[in-house]
Image (spheres, coloured by chain):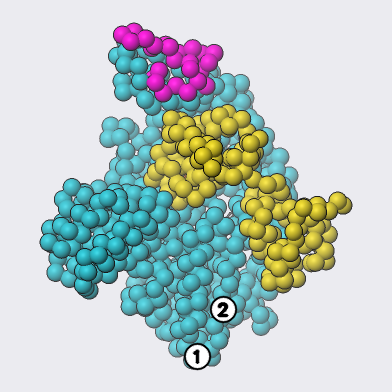
Amino acid sequence: MNKVLVCAGTSGISAGALEVADAFAREIENRSLKGWSLVRTGDRGLFRDVLVDIVTENSGRVSYQYIREQDVAEIVQSHLIEGKPVEKLLAGEDYRDFFSGQKRVVLENCGEIDPENLGEYTARGGYRALEKSLRQPPEDIIETVKSSGLKGRGGAGFPAGVKWEFARSAGGDEKYIICNADEGDPGAFMDRSILEGDPHSVLEGMTIAGYAAGASRGYIYCRAEYPLAIEKLEKAIKDARGEKFLGEDILGSGFSFDITVKEGAGAFVCGEETALIASVEGGRGMPVSRPPFPAQEGLRGKPTVINNAETLACVRHVIARGPGWFSSIGVEGSRGTKVFALAGKVRNTGLVEVPMGTTLRELVFGPGGGMEERNSPIKGVQIGGPSGGCLPESLLDTPIDYSSITATGAIMGSGGMVVMDTRTCMVDVARFFLEFTVAESCGKCVPCRIGLKRMLEVLTDITEGRGRMEHLEFLERISSTVKSSALCGLGNTAPNPVATTLKYFRQEYVTHIKEKKCPSGVCLKLIEFVVVDEKCKKCGKCYGVCPAGAVSWEKGGYASIDREKCIKCRACINACPFSAIE
Amino acid sequence: MNKNPDIDLTPAREAVESRGRRRSSLIPILQDIQKIYGYVPRPAAEMVAEELSIFPAEVYGTLTFYAQFRLEPRGRHIIKVCQGTACHVMGGKDILDYLSGRLGITTGGTTSDGLFSLERVACLGCCGIAPVVVVDEKFFGHVTVQKIESIIESYRQGASGE
Ligand SMILES: Cc1cc2nc3c(=O)[nH]c(=O)nc-3n(C[C@H](O)[C@H](O)[C@H](O)COP(=O)(O)O)c2cc1C
Ligand code: FES
């Protein structure tokens, strides 16, 4: 069977994938083409608007990028009917670099199968790990997962098998598995793509976890902003029940386990385990201090295993291919692969899965394809989102494993990674993350509620020209206090973006304070927009785009900007073909 | 407590019925109610408290804790501006500030003609087209100030053409 694969996850759909898929369906139907099937897959991971792959039995696989509805007829005529790929629409070298630099284990099915089709999942080995597990005693499964070295992908990196063992050995007959798919890091979407593109892999991992830990109920706590993921999950759960992979007496083994989706309601702190439990129980998602750990006393007071969605998606590979295979990937202390949401000023943005131990540089210049603007130097990489840190160019050779990343003052985090160039202001980035954590702090403990707020005030002062040198020491002192005294992980890690930028990009803070300047041209209060006459070619483009009427220009003359009227929206800077506005 | 006579609570009661009168159903019930009315009307929240035998303050505590819930009706079109990391680095803040100035409302507000509400969201999962703005369900990528103007204009015209 020949196939047309259209990437139609959230990112594909935002670029028009459904229209493209419908157009293919129409063309195939209208021309009565036989032997072709159309598959709407999840996102493959690379952002190139709509991606389409044509897979034929004879000539293998050909990839197209930036496909629009109006291109479809040509592809069908030339490629599907005449067998000649449409050269001008083909994906290029970037595309190959992006995929060849990865090791796709967790993402193996994303962009390959129809997530709503259970048959496609089982055809690629799906649910075989569950079958295999059910033939072994639960203790053996725990041993297997422990020896594979699989650690939690949600941020903290706790060994998954050990957590399951805690829950198993805790007393009581009622236990729960919760899949954490809250994904609150504002720059991350790994879990979403897995849930959208391969929902059964998470269900399978949860069911195995349930069997190992002795639980009979599972919940998936999914971020409310992920309607498509929730829809795919609901469908997958229904289908899995139909085939006895879920529900009563799974595959005739006598083991019963069922899964319910719980929609989050938009609170970052609910990604924290105890807050998540409070939220599932129906109240405000406020964390409580641990111990007791959820594995001992969790949901409704019962032992509860909470694992991240990506962690659970790894499980079937550990079981099916064996712990030795899994631990052969990666490095000591960090086994397997990790998925990152790569964004910012790189050429190829999207989801990248690499073996643990890959260096930041290899990731950015391999699958990432290097900087977006070839000559623009890389200034740093932010890893771990609001709990993580900004690392400078000099640390790019740091391998991505739990201990090496932690040693720099950042954290592995759940997988957000943003590449920054000289147009990114580090003080602004620190302020951005802090603004986020201040807004998301639940307000229960003083260090987080007040400490972070004070830090944000000081950072705002610095970005608006009121900074003083003693502010730097003040920031460092509060950072370490909040870090050590906050109640939960939110406060414990929230100072990281500030602490790391202060450590690695201190000069930028000093310039903001002493010279009242933002070297990257980001902090609005510290910049004035002026036209440089030497560079101005009198084209008037800036005059045309200014929404505030602040630019004056007459044909044949230089443009100039009225500071009083200027709202600093940057429209003129972006419009100027000669970089004449600074 | 003043009961608002204009609101028909029947569908809200049905939501309570179908989710069950359990404390753990509180959030799903409120989510259903918001889907029905577009926001959570005060009488509906009070009804839920009564049905679940909890204090209205507990319901309000939950409503105000989560970013998803709205206590006021929203505009006809919801403009969401992504404030995720990638969008921030690509200028998402400028876009939000500009929109807020242009519409004369702050984040979370609704224009006096009831046409637009302005909201911020974190990462919509399409960072490759950052900065991103979503109006209702429609995505706009690589947004600039000029694009914003034409987007707003097209929705204004849609409204006056009806
Ligand atoms: C403020 C905060 C937010 C968190 N958000 C998430 C999240 O969105 N997803 C996630 O899997 N873990 C999140 N975590 C980590 C979880 O608390 C927990 O460690 C994790 O879900 C355990 O699963 P794992 O061992 O498989 O990583 C968060 C922690 C904190 C403190
Ligand atoms: S940060 Fe805006 S889409 Fe990801």
B6 up-or-down from A61: above or below:
above
User: Magenta segment: does it hold A98?
Assistant: no
Q: Residue furthest front?
A: B162
Mark 1 highlights which residue?
A: A253
**The chain shown in yellow is which?**
B
Q: Residue furthest right?
A: B1
Which residues are drawn in magenta? A542-567
A352 up-or-down from A512: above or below:
below
The percent position of residue A213, horizontal first and vertical second, equals 56, 78
A495, A563: nearer the viewer: A563
User: Magenta segment: does it hold A556?
Assistant: yes
- Amino acid type shown at disc 2: Asp
Q: Quadrant of ligand 1?
A: bottom right
The percent position of residue A450, horizontal first and vertical second, equals 71, 40
The secondary element bearing badge 2 is classed as strand
A169, A265: nearer the viewer: A265
Can the viewer see residue A466?
yes
User: Residue at (58%, 72%) from the top-left corner?
Assistant: A260
A29, A233: nearer the viewer: A29
**The chain shown in cyan is which?**
A
Mark 2 highlights which residue?
A: A258
Task: Specify whether disc 1 shares its chain with disc 2.
Answer: yes
A208 up-or-down from A579: above or below:
below
Q: To which quarter of the image does residue A19 belong?
A: bottom left
The chain containing the residue under callout 2 comes to A
